Amino acid sequence: MRQEDGRFDVISHDGRRIMRLRSLDRVLLPFQRAPEVSARVIWADPEPETDPEPEAEPVPA
């Protein structure tokens, strides 16, 4: 999670490893050391866009 101060909070999937890192470049480094680990960054939008209203069905003439 990116914080307002620009740092990133990283939590492993099992919740046992919690880190606060200064840059996105450093986020994946601790997880790349183990060959059996697959790590990726997932962005979550706190204010997702809403779908536009569906267009009205055309009325037959």
Image (spheres, rainbow, N blue to C red):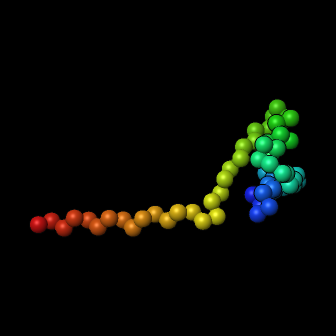
- Using the image, determine if residue 43 lies above or below residue 33: below
Name the spot of residue 37 as percent of width and height, x first. Answer: 80, 38
Residue 42 can be seen, yes or no: yes
Residue 11 can be seen, yes or no: no
Q: Would residue 9 be found to the left or right of residue 55 on screen?
A: right
| Closest to the observer, 18 or 49 | 49
- Using the image, determine if residue 7 lies above or below residue 39: below
Q: How many marks?
A: 0
- Using the image, determine if residue 33 lies above or below residue 51: above
Q: Residue at x 66, y 53 (%)?
A: 43
Which of the 4 image quadrants contains residue 31? top right
Q: Residue at x 78, y 43 (%)?
A: 25
Q: Residue at x 86, y 35 (%)?
A: 33
Q: Residue at x 36, y 65 (%)?
A: 54
Quarter the C terminus occupies: bottom left
Q: Quick one: which residue is furthest to the left in this view?
A: 61
Q: Would residue 2 be found to the left or right of residue 43 on screen?
A: right
Quarter the N terminus occupies: bottom right
Which of the 4 image quadrants contains residue 40? top right
Q: Quick one: which residue is furthest to the top in this view?
A: 35
Which of the 4 image quadrants contains residue 58? bottom left
Name the spot of residue 27 as percent of width and height, x first. Answer: 80, 46
| Closest to the observer, 26 or 44 | 26
Name the spot of residue 13 as percent of width and height, x first. Answer: 79, 51
